[in-house]
Amino acid sequence: MSDNTPNLAQELIRTANALRERGLLFRGAHANLSARQDDRLLITRGGSVANLGEKDLSWLPVAAEGLQADFDANYREIIEMHTRLYRHRANICAIIHCHPAHSTAFAVAQQPVPAVYEPMLRQGMHTDVPVVAWAPRGSSASVNGILEAFDRPDKVAVLLANHGVLVTGETPEVALNRLTALEEAAELVLHARVLGGEKALPDAAYQEVAERMQRFRKAS
């Protein structure tokens, strides 16, 4: 293991704790998280992340497919969802999948979360967060649908129809912040619809925010 191994494990544990603290876990605290380091990834090994510890994490090669020794058969589809997405997009280095209440409500309704909340733009979500069509868990159709949604290099999050949310990032912290903004947006849009419906940002806002964030990144 590299010198960074303990740091990456602690980063995933901190992220899992933040999911709980920010109210991003549903009642069963079900989620799976991973982070990539070179040609391997560190991934959660169980269903609940309510009390995640280093013993609940396992290393896998990014090239891994199918059932792995440290995982039960029910986790096979999770392994393939993470490993195949990392192979599909080199700029993805962290993945969070969970079921936050408001954005999952959109997934159950099979409706995208509209990009009308400015913090979404600041977290790299400049277009509506789409819904990936439902397919049986563990099936090629399920994972292929996710990969197709991530064909666009700027796509960072999707809703999984009738199931939950999948968010990516360059680090677990980036993925966490994107998930937070997405869940806030979903909750606020639901409230806005009681008041007559959400309103789109000016067309120029999307480009202006993207350009400003790019300048900030270069300056730092």
Image (spheres, grey):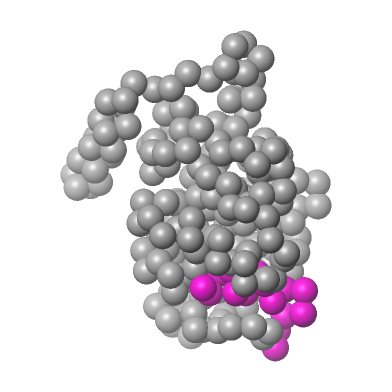
Q: Residue at x 27, y 33 (%)?
A: 207
Q: Position of residue 192 (x, y in %)?
A: 59, 18
On screen, residue 95 versus residue 209, left or right, reads right
Q: Main secondary structure of the magenta part?
A: helix
Q: Position of residue 55 (x, y in %)?
A: 69, 75
The answer to which image quadrant residue 60 occupies is bottom right
Q: Position of residue 168 (x, y in %)?
A: 48, 56
Rendered view: 104 above or below 49: above
**In-front residue for pair 171/206:** 206
Q: Residue at x 47, y 28 (%)?
A: 117
Would residue 29 be visible to someone looking at this image? Answer: yes
Q: Residue at x 73, y 64 (%)?
A: 136
Please give the count of numbered marks on the rendered protein.
0
The answer to which image quadrant residue 24 occupies is top right
- What residue span does the magenta drawing correspond to? 69-84
Q: Position of residue 175 (x, y in %)?
A: 49, 52
Residue 79 forms part of the magenta stretch: yes
